[in-house]
Image (cartoon, rainbow, N blue to C red):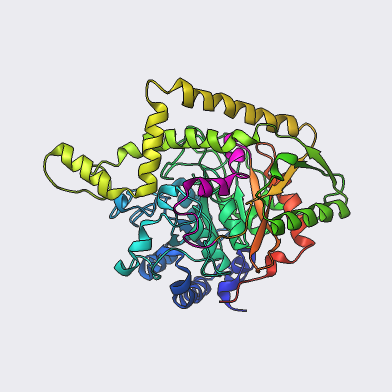
Amino acid sequence: MDLYTGTIKNTVDYIGGDREKAKAVVRSLGERVQTVDKRIGAYVGFDAATVLKQLEAIKNNTPYFGLPVSLKDNMCTQGWETTCSSNILQGYIPPYNATVVEKLKEKGAFVFAKCDMDEFAFGSSCETSCYNNRAQKQKKIKNGPTSNPWDCGRVVGGSSGGSAACVAADEAICALGSDTGGSIRQPAALCGVVGLKPTYGRVSRYGLIAFGSSLDQIGPLTKTVEDSAHMLGIIAGYDEKDSTSANVPVPNYTQSLIDNVKGLCVGIPKEYFIEGVDPDVKEAIKSAIDMYTSLGAHCSDVSLPHTEYAVSVYYVIATAEASSNLARFDGVQYGYRCDKGDLHTMYFETRNRGFGQEAKRRILLGTFVLSAGYYDAYYLKAQKVRTLIMNDFQNAFKQCDVILTPTSPTPAFKQGERMDDPIAMYLSDIFTIPVNLAGIPAISIPAGFSRDGLPIGLQLLAPAFCEERLFQAAYTFEQNTNFHTKRPKL
Ligand code: GLN
């Protein structure tokens, strides 16, 4: 077996605390990156010297000794450029590590590479990354947007597209992404890997460059459900540096990897089986429901009546928070500065040249909905509807243990197809966004393939802090299917 194909479990077992073997895993992955990343373009920062230095510093007798983890480029890595795939953060080298990076280190894992993403996590296809035009400047091996390993003419999904692609293409053992409206689960679905958005507050956001602070969560992208449980166990937990972090004990998630769903109540929300869902996706989800039923679960209809407002509510709240979070990028404190003219011109030109089109669109929208005359009509109203969406889930979970839905209405779409149509792009997240508004956890797992051979994802939702329930339901599905064992031919 080539070492780069490993899961967390068998990689850690293979290394067995031996630094030389950890180096062998890194070399194997490095060769894989050289061979396939010219076609995929998952990475924007892969630096052999940094990796080897980290390997030397790993603490002995740690449970995940030598485990390489790829990181979305919006998580701060001390001494290692962190750019959010934006021109405005070119040259920004954080003086500190995100809490998740510290947690990886405590357990013996380390950052292997930085992954491409939509600029500031704004997008669903990885096509808003500044590196799509900068590959020639050596940040990325491939020129153009990150490609889907199953069909290089298609998108990887976003915004954690690089994190999903590197796992699917076996250029990583596992990766971390962030999810504000679907950014872990949607690319996981489109690339045929497992993606988990934990409960809001479960994982510290300290050192995650903020997009929508009331929605953002960091989570794992992995080859299996078992790996997802391992990774959440590493990164979860209270952090006094994040005021929204929850002081709730972290269970041993691997104990919930039990192949049994007998008596589990699975809710199927009728609002998620609407027009516009691809027939192959519908078919795969229907088969999954049949599979759960045959394994002894009870599947029944539930209703989430305010679903239709979720995308609109999200684009008011998320842009409002983004416009405020992005105000700090002014050419003075971080990264790029356009040193021209007086102070005002410097601010203006730095932001004008530094931000891409989608970032500008979000700043404009967010500033508008927060402006004095419109605050009540948009922002305040959106907050009220957000509460109704939360209540929908609370009511539904009185009738079922988990909720099952498609992750994305369609498999991976063609590159360029939705770039001139922001509404079509925004609708890619119609099934993932409500989860962030409610703050609950959800997992996307491989659930089949379209007629064109593209992966299809199934999403499971649970009440806050019930990730264990997700793991058990997802693990059972995985044990009884073989979709997760399929790999793209590269
Ligand atoms: N695609 C959604 C957006 O563009 C969600 C992104 C995310 O979760 N970061 O906002």
| Residue located at (52% from left, 24% from top) | 381
Q: Which residues are magenta?
A: 414-440
Q: Which picture quadrant has residue 489?
A: bottom right
Can residue 430 be found in the magenta stretch? Answer: yes
Q: Quadrant of the N terminus?
A: bottom right
User: How many labels, in total?
Assistant: 0
Residue 325 visible in the picture: no
| Residue located at (77% from left, 61% from top) | 479
Q: Is residue 212 left or right of residue 394?
A: left
Q: Is residue 323 left or right of residue 65?
A: left
Query: Up-down: is 106 above or below 246?
Result: below
Residue nearest the observer in this picture, 305 or 466: 305
Measured from the top left, where is residue 181 in percent x and y?
54, 43
| Residue located at (63% from left, 71% from top) | 487
Can residue 172 be found in the magenta stretch? Answer: no
Residue 112 visible in the picture: yes
Q: Is residue 307 left or right of residue 40?
A: right
Measured from the top left, where is residue 56 in percent x and y?
42, 66
Measured from the top left, where is residue 232 in percent x and y?
60, 50
Query: Up-down: is 42 above or below 236?
Result: below
Q: Quadrant of the C terminus?
A: bottom right
Q: Which picture quadrant has residue 46?
A: bottom left
Measured from the top left, where is residue 234 in percent x and y?
57, 51
| Residue located at (34% from left, 65% from top) | 139
| Residue lying furthest left | 341
